[in-house]
Image (cartoon, helix red, strand yellow):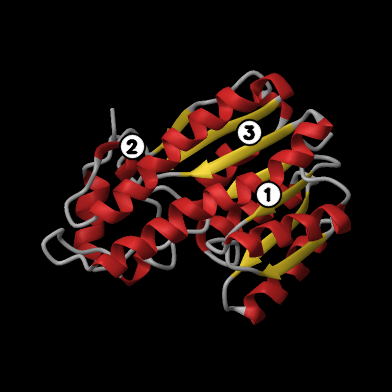
Amino acid sequence: MKLLENKSAIVTGATRGIGKSIAVEFAKQGANVAFTYNASVDAAKALEKELTSYGVTAKGYQSNAADFNAAQELAKEVQKQFGSIDILVNNAGITKDNLLMRISEEDFDKVIEVNLKSVFNLTKAVIRPMMKQRAGSIINMSSVVGLKGNAGQANYAASKAGIVGFSKSVALELGSRNVRSNVIAPGFIETEMTAKLDEATVQSWRDGIPLKRGGQPIDIANACVFLASDMSAYITGQTISVDGGMLT
């Protein structure tokens, strides 16, 4: 029996890196997957094809999670086409790093809007159907930076810390309807983005992690499968750090 058989999931920002890995693992575990993407139409088509090869229904939606109305429309569309929304993974996010002295108001607002407001937008869009069916798992992607801060990332850290407080509040509000809300806080995960960094810098980061390696997108995806499945039926309001021991 696959862990997510007959469940339908929305995964935001899924055409590359962590989001893509989550979508693929969900499909392997039997979930039907609706995913969002921003601009990469070709990548979305390729992902649709890959996901359906696992015998599930999959569809990509070009949708801006930071736009409130677009998020409501997306949820309506997915509900109509997939029949239910059992899992929501709020994964879409951006960085606009700079020291506080140099962060523009625009760069602060943009990061909050894409990383934090999008979580509000989509959570609000799915809670009605989830409450009605008396089941649902909401998984929000924070970061080790949201838990400990990081120089040059005040905007990003604020957005990711906000996700933790928001998710705990949702867990308290919706627990009686059997809708769960949890957070995953990735540490240093090696993706296409980190591949562009200087190897010596990356190695020094790895050396500072107790497990002596960077994480892989699959490490985050596996934690998502657990939180999305009935194996975690009694877990809500929690933040799981998937960071190789960075915050230990």
Q: Residues within 10 Å of mark 1 (few under 14, many from 20)?
A: many
Q: Mark 1 to mark 2: distance in Å?
A: 38 Å
Q: For the residues labelled 3 and 1, say whether their Cβ atoms are less than 8 Å apart.
A: no
Q: Which dot, 2 or 3, sits closer to the camera?
A: 3
Instruction: Tell me the SS state at disc 2.
Output: loop
Residue that numbered label 2 is attached to: 211
The answer to whether residue 236 of the structure is visible from this angle is no
Q: Mark 2 to mark 3: distance in Å?
A: 21 Å
Instruction: Tell me the SS state at disc 3.
Output: helix
Total numbered badges shown on the rendered structure: 3
User: For the residue marked with disc 1, what is the amino acid?
Assistant: Ala
Most distant residue in the bottom direction: 42
Answer above or below: position of 44 versus 58.
Answer: below
Please name whichever residue, 64 or 95, is drawn nearer the observer in this view of the structure: 64
User: For the residue marked with disc 3, what is the amino acid?
Assistant: Phe
Residue that numbered label 1 is attached to: 125
- Expressed as whole percent of the image width and height from the top left, the position of residue 129 reads 78, 41
- Expressed as whole percent of the image width and height from the top left, the position of residue 32 reads 80, 52
* Numbered mark located on residue 226 in the image: 3
